[in-house]
Amino acid sequence: MKTKGKLGWLLVLLPLLLLAGGPAAAASPAEKGLDGGTAPAPVSQLSDEERGDKLKQLETAAEALYGHMQQGRVEEAHAEMKRLIAALEGVSFKGLTSVEGIHALAESIMDARETLARSEIVPDEWSRSSAVLRLAVNSLLHKDKGLWLQYYKVMADDMQRMNNARVGGQSEKLHAAFVNLQQHYETIRPAAVIRRDPSTVNRFDSWLSYAERLSNDQPVDEAALKEAIRQGESALKALFGRKGEEPVFLPITGYENPWYWSGLIGLWIVLALGYTGLRKFQAAQTVTVVGRTDEDSYRYRF
């Protein structure tokens, strides 16, 4: 983490999330705050009904906090943050996510809390941190229908714009498209960590670092970037659990002009129709009348 205050709160909150609902245990050095105090001791395990109620309270608080922070309502946002922290007490996350997922959730909570604690309201920061937290909590509680999954199309469009800028040699548009992709990924990353295998997330992290370097190079290595975008398409599908055959965007190969292919396809259609019409005309010119006997009148014709 970047700040001492955020690190202190993370060291307090993370053990609580990891151990909540389990047997009491002595706090390790890693579980101590910066002031030397120990993290809150885990409480007794909740019943399934109580656990379900706590998780509902967590989601409700996250949704309300998102709304207040998007609108810049300070007092209401602080109140909802307190409710959200209270909803975490005693809740076991066993079966909901991995240790990495719990760590990502804790970071998103602390990031939103630190943003709230600043004396100056920065609308973009309030909007971003509240969105990250909302998506993380939603991902925790909705395994297959998390809101973060809706970002697949958004990020695929970012990648499409990168590809279009690459083809046109437009370095500024290429960089802008990459920045948008990076920002969208940072928004959904904690939610993805909660649901995906760490190797899948690390793969996209590595690809993003590589693509950033290529998009900043001057001049742009067009061939390397083309291959990188192809790899990014695969990494994006894996991140969102999409099937390999589902296209993110149509590859541009050969002539890098879509109007060329549109015209060529149209020409093929015209030639096919013309050939069919010619064959029918020739057939009409060679029709002969075949005589028919009375016996033929009683036979079925096929």
Image (spheres, helix red, strand yellow):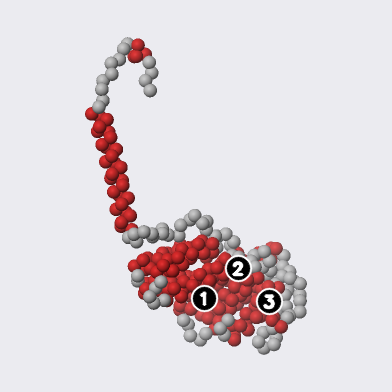
Q: Is residue 101 visible?
A: yes
Cα distance between the residues tagged 3 and 2: 20 Å
Front-most of 166 and 239? 166
Q: Which residue is mark 3?
A: 15
Secondary structure, mark 3, is helix
Q: Which residue is mark 2?
A: 198
Q: Is residue 162 visible?
A: no
Q: Which residue is mark 1?
A: 129
Tag 1 or tag 3, which sits nearer the N-term?
3
Q: Residue at left 26%, top 20%? A: 289
- In the displayed structure, would residue 36 be above or below residue 232? below
Categorize mark 3 by other alpha carbons within 10 Å: few (<14), some (14-19), many (20+). Answer: many
Categorize mark 2 by other alpha carbons within 10 Å: few (<14), some (14-19), many (20+). Answer: some
Q: Residue at left 46%, top 74%? A: 212
Instruction: Specify the amino acid type for callout 1.
Output: Ser
The image position of residue 68, as x and y in percent, is 50, 74
**Mark 3 or 2: the one toward you:** 2
The image position of residue 5, as x and y in percent, is 59, 85
Secondary structure, mark 1, is helix
Residue 22 lies in quadrant: bottom right
